[in-house]
Amino acid sequence: MWCWRRTEKIRWTDRVTNEEVLRRVNEQRSILQAITRRKANWLGHIMRRNGILSDITEGQVEGKRGLGRRRIQLTDDLKQGKKMTFQELKREAENRENWRALFGQSNGPVVRQNT
């Protein structure tokens, strides 16, 4: 954002919102895609390792099951978008190149607008 403000010659004292700056430089935020991409990168990192974090994401921690509806798991939105089971996700996470091809690399929260 700072770079775009500099290129547009917007001083820090000017009251110009970030949305206005993005509009001026023809950019668009895609926050949900960025969150999903970063979450996929983090989960891929966790799934490739052995430890307590991987045990927690796999649901292997012993404990008392609560009442009510099922809790949303970290991997639910990744499984739903790609129509994969957890075991298939874990197998893909073992190979970093396949994982990046499946979910993309984290390039930040801003994507070029196609206009």
Image (tube, rainbow, N blue to C red):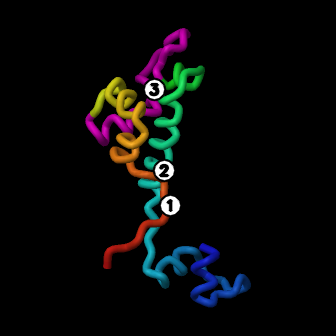
Q: Say which quadrant the C terminus sits in.
A: bottom left
Give the answer, above or below, for where 63 lies relative to 85.
above
Q: Which residue is mark 1?
A: 109
Q: Is residue 57 left or right of residue 81?
A: right
- Residue 24 spot, x, y in % from top left: 49, 84
As for residue 37 lying within the magenta part, the answer is no
- Residue 49 spot, x, y in % from top left: 53, 27
Q: Are marks 2 and 3 in contact (CB under 8 Å)?
A: no
| Mark 2 secondary-structure assignment | helix
| Residue sitting at x 48%, y 65% | 110
| Residue sitting at x 26%, y 36% | 83
Q: Which residue is mark 3?
A: 71
Q: Is residue 96 left or right of residue 56?
A: left
Q: Which residue range is magenta in the image?
A: 58-83
| Mark 1 secondary-structure assignment | loop
Residue type at the position of mark 3: Arg
As for residue 82 lying within the magenta part, the answer is yes
Q: Which residue is mark 2?
A: 35
Number of the front mark, 2 or 3: 2
- Residue 34 spot, x, y in % from top left: 47, 54
Number of the front mark, 1 or 3: 1
